[in-house]
Image (tube, rainbow, N blue to C red):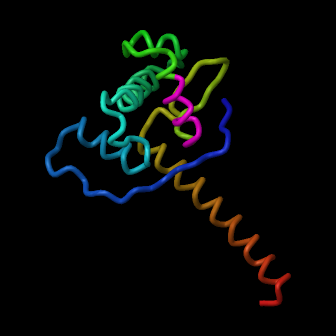
Amino acid sequence: MIITRQRITIIRTARPRKRDINDELKWFGRSLGLFSERDKDSSLYRLFVELIKSGRQGRLLSSDELAYRLKLSRGTVVHHLNKLLESGIVVTERNRYALRVSNLEILVDELRRDIRRTMENLKEIARQIDDELGF
């Protein structure tokens, strides 16, 4: 599987007050900057849930399969898949898509490692720049 550049936006929002799986999944996605108010028909949310379901079964799905299951246009599905690919949450293999891992807790751990590694690289470069500038 291929993981390309990642762009994650962490948004701090209040957790849902009541225990409802849909509200918690929406909060999870909003916290990762995935879902916005522009997604009026919740198509990205529905795609995310479908990928979670297929991941639990160990299946990768094509954009056509996702479009059919969700009753969305293939263009809409591809648009959302690109956003999820850019975030590093979804991976692709032979034109089929899946969540990066089959478990959301592990996904958070993976993203945490990615962020930590990126911050360590930034710190190293910052140190080199500071040294060159004589700080």
Q: Residue at x 21, y 50 (%)?
A: 16
Q: Residue at x 65, y 59 (%)?
A: 117
Q: Position of residue 62 (x, y in %)?
A: 55, 15
74 displayed left or right of 30: right
Vertical placement of residue 104 versus 44, above or below: below
Q: As drawn, which residue projects farthest toward the right? A: 132
Vertical placement of residue 115 versus 33, above or below: below
Q: Residue at x 57, y 48 (%)?
A: 7
105 displayed left or right of 81: left
- On-image quarter of the N terminus: top right
Magenta segment boundaries in residue numbering: 78-87
* 4 within the magenta span: no
43 displayed left or right of 4: left
Q: Position of residue 99 (x, y in %)?
A: 51, 31
* Majority SS type along the magenta span: helix
Q: Position of residue 129 (x, y in %)?
A: 79, 77
Q: As drawn, which residue projects farthest toward the left? A: 18
Most foreground residue, 102 or 82: 82
Q: Quadrant of residue 41?
A: top left
Q: Residue at x 82, y 85 (%)?
A: 133
Most foreground residue, 33 or 16: 33
Q: As drawn, which residue projects farthest toward the bottom? A: 135
The number of discs equals: 0
- On-image quarter of the C terminus: bottom right
